[in-house]
Image (cartoon, helix red, strand yellow):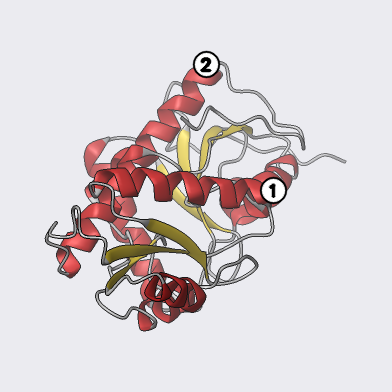
Amino acid sequence: MHRIRHLPAHRPASAAPALVAVAHGSRDPRTPHAVAALLDRVRELRPGLDVRIGHIELNTPLLPDALDALGAGEAVLVPLLLGRGHHVKHDIPASVAAAPALRARVAAPLGPHPLLVEALHDRLAEAGWDGSGRGDRGTAVVLAAAGSRDPESAADARHTARLLGERLGGVPVVPAYASAASPTVPAAVRALAARGHRRIAVASYFTAPGRFASAAAAHAPWIAAAPLGAHPALARLLLHRYDEARAAGAALCDIPMNTRFAASA
């Protein structure tokens, strides 16, 4: 027998679909606080929008519970993930498929996008990057990312590295990974040093603090940027992905396992 899910009384039927930010989850106690601060910025930018959080693992609420709480409502799920990988392609659509009463669409992951590059650049500047590396062959950046076995995830990281290199005036930017892909962050640092780069910064391509971000920063021979966190550009990007997904399907419909995503340009 199918369960009947009712639209919560506090969300009128005419309201915009809820924005459900989908975070990975972490054992690091700083991570939920960073994500909450980011979502507070999103609420400030879009007053009245129902903004919620769901985690793939480790933290509550887990995504299935967050979706169940929406009942027979409407939602746009925005992955707080920086590229196409297993969570985006499989785990999130599977959670949506398990909530058949919910009308939902899954937005594209956050990256690659120029707004991410804006945030990465600002975090490097906060760490001490002063722009003096322009034209200096001794300066380089390692873009430290989580890593995935999915080749499209690596392609997304390379795309972001190219955009960041352009933003930094042609400074070499090499993507490296904390797990599941190569090169590792220390291997990338060694390779750049072997090519004569004396000042090597680590840009943290993580949405929040955590074990991987801390480990990557520990390998920085010069400066290490903080994770993206509640940067204003990241909040704008969440709303951009939300609006993009809504525009791709004005009448939200149930999503099958082969979820189609909004364009990630």
* Amino acid under disc 2: Ala
Q: CA distance from mark 2 to mark 1?
A: 22 Å
Nearer-the-camera pick, 225 or 56: 225
Secondary structure of residue under mark 2: loop
Could you tell me which residue is drawn at 26 percent across and 44 percent down? Answer: 167
Identify residue for label 2.
250
Hey, which quadrant is residue 149 in on the image?
bottom right
Q: Residue at x 56, y 42 (%)?
A: 70
Q: Disc 1 on helix, strand or loop?
A: helix
Can the viewer see residue 21 in this picture?
no
Q: Position of residue 88 (x, y in %)?
A: 62, 47
Res 95 label: 1
Would residue 50 be found to the left or right of residue 258 on screen?
left
Taking depth in this image into account, of 69 and 194 the one nearest to the observer is: 194
At which x and y percent is residue 248?
53, 19
Circle 2 residues within 10 Å: few <14, some 14–19, many ≥20? few
